[in-house]
Image (cartoon, rainbow, N blue to C red):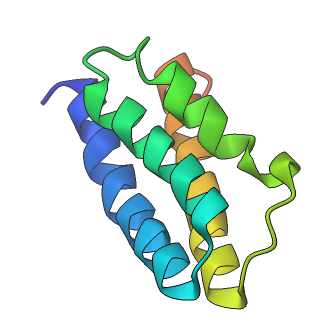
Amino acid sequence: MHKAAVVRNEIAPLLDQLIYQLGAEGRATPRAHFNRIRKLLYRADTTQDLASPLINLCSSVVLGFRLSADSTALLERLMNKSQHLMAELDGSHITHH
C-alpha cells in the first residue's frame, strides 16, 4: 500500500473524531483548523505531500485553542501518532534487533 494511504488510514479516523467532537462542543475556530488539515491529508498523494498536514497537526498546540478534556485527549493521541509516523517516514525510526 502507498505510504500516503497508510498514513491517511492511521490518522484520518482520529482526526474525524476530533472534528466531530469540536463541532459538538461548538468550537468553530479549532474545527475549521482541523478541517483544513483533513483536506490537506486527503489530497496527499506522496510522502512529501504529507509534510504540511502532519506539521500543521503537530504544531496545533501552539495555537492556544481551549479544548475540552475529550478534545484534548483526541488531539494528544493524534499528535503522538503523527510524530511516530513522521519519524517512520523520515527514516529516523530505527528498529534494533
Residue 8, horizontal then vertical, whole percent: 30, 42
Residue 76, horizontal then vertical, whole percent: 67, 66
- Residue 68 vertical position relative to residue 5 in the rendered view, above or below: below
* Residue drawn at the location 40% of the way across and 16% of the way down: 49
Can residue 95 be seen here? no
- Residue 14 vertical position relative to residue 48 in the rendered view, above or below: below
Can residue 42 be seen here? yes
* Residue drawn at the location 74% of the way across and 76% of the way down: 67
Image-based side of 72 in relation to 90, left or right:
right
Q: Nearer the viewer, residue 59 or 86?
A: 59
Q: Nearer the viewer, residue 80 or 43?
A: 43
* Residue drawn at the location 72% of the way across and 48% of the way down: 60
- Residue 84 vertical position relative to residue 2 in the rendered view, above or below: below
Q: Quadrant of residue 28?
A: bottom right
Residue 37, horizontal then vertical, whole percent: 49, 40
Residue 81, horizontal then vertical, whole percent: 53, 53
* Residue drawn at the location 81% of the way across and 72% of the way down: 66
Q: Nearer the viewer, residue 82 or 34?
A: 34
